[in-house]
Amino acid sequence: MIQMKRKGLIVVVSGFSGTGKGTLMKALVAKYGNYALSVSATTRSPRPGEENGREYFFISDTEFEKMIAEDGLIEHAGYCKHYYGTPKKYVEEQIEQGKDVILEIEIQGALQIKEKFPEALLLFVMPPSVAELEKRLKGRGTETDEVIHERMLRAKAESEGIEKYDYIVINDQLDECVEQMNSIIDAAHYTPFRNRLFIEDIRGQLKQLS
């Protein structure tokens, strides 16, 4: 008999640059103990305060392309002239341990994940308004006006793919958003689609009734 076992999920979090995805995910992991935050690899340079192996694995184009060739990534994508990708080994280890693995990935990579792992949960983080999004980008103080304009144009393009996600989350008040995300992920564990083996086991037992 198959018992209903809570398996780890891959939870993909995407959103426009400046929506606070990183802050949101760190708060989620800090508040609840059932999550593991995946660290992506990227070829972009570290921002002030970022550390290799904490926010990202900062590697060269050559190193990244080697990982692609050796099938060491579960997804990868180009964004603003840089590579981003998710190392495979860590994700698989955490899922086996029953942890929900949170991945911050752009739309292109998120759809790759959904294709390879249909049970993955896709969340898109949105700002309360476009004006607030631009304000947050400028408030970083780490990017030029040209880069900010580029990110706003990128957001315009990304907005066309939001319907492909399972849920949207509006990051206005951080604490409320964290609770909402946790509730969504918790509920996703109990969808019939993600519990097919358990359902089939119950059906099999019912068929034995006369």
Image (cartoon, rainbow, N blue to C red):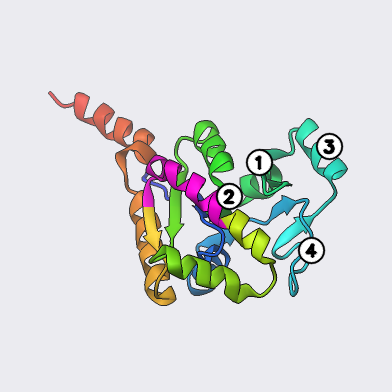
Residue 150 is situated, as x and y percent measured from the top left of the image, at 62, 54
189 horizontally vs 24: left or right:
left
Q: Secondary structure at mark 4?
A: loop
Question: Vertically, is 192 above or below 174?
Answer: above
Would you name the residue on which mark 3 appears?
A: 66
Can you tell which mark lies on residue 77?
A: 1
Evaluate whether residue 154 shows in this view.
yes
Q: Secondary structure at mark 3?
A: helix
Mark 4 and mark 3 lie on one chain; the one further toward the N terminus is: 4
Q: Quadrant of the C terminus?
A: top left
Magenta-tinted stretch: 152-167
Would you name the residue on which mark 2 appears?
A: 105
* Predominant secondary structure, magenta span: helix
- Picture quadrant where residue 89 is located: top right
Q: CB atoms at circles 3 and 1 under 8 Å apart?
A: no
Mark 2 and mark 1 lie on one chain; the one further toward the N terminus is: 1
Q: Quadrant of the N terminus?
A: top left
Name the residue type under label 3.
Lys
How crowded pointer 4 is (Cα within 10 Å; few <14, some 14-19, many 20+) is rated as few
